[in-house]
Amino acid sequence: MTIPSQFDAKAAEGKWYEYWMKHNYFHSEPDHRTPYTIVIPPPNVTGVLHMGHMLNNTIQDVLIRRARLKGFNACWVPGTDHASIATEAKVVAKLKAEGINKNDLTREEFLKHAWEWTDKYGGVILEQLKKLGASCDWDRTKFTMDPDMSASVIKSFVDLYNKGLIYRGYRMVNWDPEAKTTLSDEEVNYEERQGTLYHLKYKIEGSEDYVTVATTRPETILGDTAICINPNDERYTHLKGKNAIVPIANRVIPIIFDEYVDMEFGTGCLKVTPAHDVNDKELGERHNLEIIDIFNDDATLNSFGLHYAGKDRFVVRDEIANELETIGSLAKTEVHVNKVGTSERTKAVIEPRLSDQWFLKMEELAKPAIKAVLETEEVKLYPKRFDNTYRHWMENIRDWNISRQLWWGQQIPAYYFGDGKEDFVVAENAADALALAKERTGNQNLTAADLKQDPDALDTWFSSWLWPMAVFGGILEPENKDFKYYYPTNDLVTGPDILFFWVARMIVAGYEYTGEKPFSNVYLTGLVRDNQRRKMSKSLGNSPDPLDLIEKFGADGVRTGLLLSASAGNDIMFDEELCNQGKAFANKIWNAFRLIKGWEVSDIEQPDSARMAISWYEAKLNKTLAEIEDHFEKYRISDALMAIYKLVWDDFCSWFLEMIKPGYQQPIDRTTYDKAIEMLEANLKLLHPFMPFLTEEIWQYIADRKPEEALIISKWPIMKQADERLIAGFETATEVISGIRTIRKDKNIPFRDSIDLKVLNNENLSAEFDSIIMKLGNVANLEYTAEKVNGALTFRAGSNEYFIPVTGAVNVEEEITKLTEELNYNKGFLKSVQAKLSNEKFVGSAPEKVVAMERQKEADALAKIATIEQSLASLK
């Protein structure tokens, strides 16, 4: 079989992925083996592969491929998330481009468009993951809107409602005016923005006096229903029992007193707008204030906005400020920096709004999840520092707003049969709802037409928090074979940005529904940033297309480049050069394989140097294997790869192959060749999780393999006790070889010329590596001596001294002259340094670093002088 001169990544990727799929290596069914299970963090159905996905899924693939090699029944469940807000926005935009307004459609008509869009684009990202080499069990692919997945969500809602944990409440919520839906607190990002603080004058009813109130949102005065002052504020005691007049609206509102107001902040007077601020809402409830909502759902002003009705809130802000100034109600303005809440999905500025929504009580539900991570450590976070973040979120948890004003998603299973807020029933389907409604009302004449289902959809996270259970049917059929076998899962790989959104909630759901953890370990990756430390994003144009990188460097090169710098929880400073490094590593391995396969094999005696090389490499392999196991156990994936990288590049390619390489146009003995192939195969097994395509390609070239002998399902190397004595001995041998090579280079002694080497063995070292030293140093004769050798070039390795007789190798007189000149130069340099150090003024006034540098120069010069003097002594 002819081996190509270069590794063709593109051809190998297509060939081997198809081969793996054809032979069903990725698929798992319950059997006698121990399961190893990962569920993919389902990417949004709207998404395409980006660098974060690339990192996250490469790590998962490394874990699942390694588990497969270690004999586990490995199951990696893929899937996508329906992403209510993002997908609905995409579909609405598509319809708008076609001249269709969502509001002109029925729910059923809109959902038909949404499913058409999902069917067309929804599988793109999963197909892209295949290019990366992701070995998911594609037969188990799930979508959060699959019928069984949706049924699981609805069943969960009904169960939690019946337990008294879900309730409907009129609350202040975060309103996204672009998506036109409520958001949970966790879906709001706060960012500092520079704005304006407006000082507004409210006239006191029946007088010419006024109070001044500072606000960043002058447009909301149209919803003001009180002015509030601290009762202990002596400046305003005369206003008790008085009313104020809202500028422009000319509405009379009471002046109320409450200790909530901070006397030191601003003017000490607070405008109260109960419909548009959560704290104002609480004040309104305490003082029975009127609630005036001035906004439409798109954040334009409604009829309470008077002549500003229909205009956007930010347009009104400028216009109303101008009007306030015109009528003399604007005292002053000043620059003000405050935190503004924005939607995580649409980036729109959030509007606090009162609304009827569905909530899930979280305080009691969270307790087992807090205990599992922070006390019993049944679930471990890597790195552990994220425990503190988890603690903060979970111990300060608030009720979860789980309803969204969207059509794309699981529709809330609440059915209304009357006009009252409590006139509803909750059931898994319309038939059950009708039966419950008849029972509740005592009216047996009710029909399905009398019931109206809540139009809202459930929060997407309320779907995905069931993911590890629902993908195995664990909510609908908790006793089914797959669920009992694969759950709890083993590892979860995700980003720290969804530690609360998703990870914590899955832990909560796991304990609520099964009494068990959903997974044992959570590996939290860092963010992929560019080399200027900026987060990669489309808007900055600093995020490369992962598929372009794969095209350029090969999937193995990209995987390796990413993972070499991807320590858990730490951000990755990505540079394409990392992928180039990965590609170079792939080429190094390919060339090493070609070198071995290019040797002629003969039934000749094995040299002692080859025998020792094999013994050493086996020891080094076992030591590295122990390091790798330790790294994986601690989820140091980058460190594991680096250990393999050094083993293969340095130990195997640079040392082992050189030690066993036959002489020019000479054959290699069969014993050594077979061992070299065995060592190469062990390396391929270690590399396979990281570089699956290259390793399978070489594996299949080595021998004609049957499908059941493919690398992907072979056995991970068995770890044996490493012979540390051999490893230490070889370290010394490499020092000696390096010493010989340095002298050859410095003295221009060609490597083709053999030399003699004499050893003053002060350390009483074993001679077992002498054959390797002789081969790699081209030493014709190696002798041990009891005393120093005159007329020789010399170097040290440890306390041992090595002598290379110079007869015929160098001109002794020229060498003595050269060394004498070098000695004199270094003595002069030492003298100047010591003069500086003996100057008390310099030592006392110069910076500590400068003095330390001079002392280092002195030490270096002394060492250099001693070496030169030793060399001169050996030549005379």
Image (tube, rainbow, N blue to C red):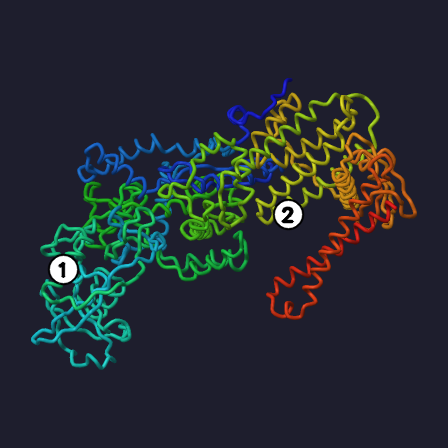
Up/down of 269 relative to 343, above or below: below
Q: Residue at x 54, y 58 (%)?
A: 376
- Relative side of 68 to 223, left or right: right
- Relative side of 823 to 11, left or right: right
Q: Residue at x 13, y 76 (%)?
A: 242
Q: Position of residue 442 (x, y in %)?
A: 22, 50
The foreground one among 843 and 736 is 843
Q: Could you classify mark 1 by the number of other residues whose Cα lies within 10 Å: few (under 14), some (14-19), or many (20 or more)? A: some
Q: Position of residue 272 (x, y in %)?
A: 20, 66
| Residue 280 visible (yes or no) | yes
Query: Among all residues in the image, which is located at the extreme top?
Result: 1
Q: Amino acid at mark 1?
A: Asn
Q: Could you classify mark 2 by the number of other residues whose Cα lies within 10 Å: few (under 14), some (14-19), or many (20 or more)? A: some
Up/down of 232 relative to 559, above or below: below
Give the mark nearer the N terminus: 2 vs 1.
1
| Residue 379 visible (yes or no) | no
Q: Which residue is mark 2?
A: 630
Up/down of 666 relative to 439, above or below: above
The foreground one among 600 and 814 is 814
Q: Residue at x 25, y 37 (%)?
A: 93
Q: Residue at x 75, y 27 (%)?
A: 673
Q: Which residue is mark 1?
A: 322
Query: Among all residues in the image, which is located at the extreme right?
Result: 786
Q: Residue 772 appears in which quarter of the rendering?
A: top right
Q: Position of residue 470 (x, y in %)?
A: 43, 42
Find residue 456 and name its label. Answer: none
Which element is circle 1 on? Answer: helix
> Label 2 vs label 1: CA separation?
68 Å
Which element is circle 2 on? Answer: helix
Number of marks in the rendered image: 2
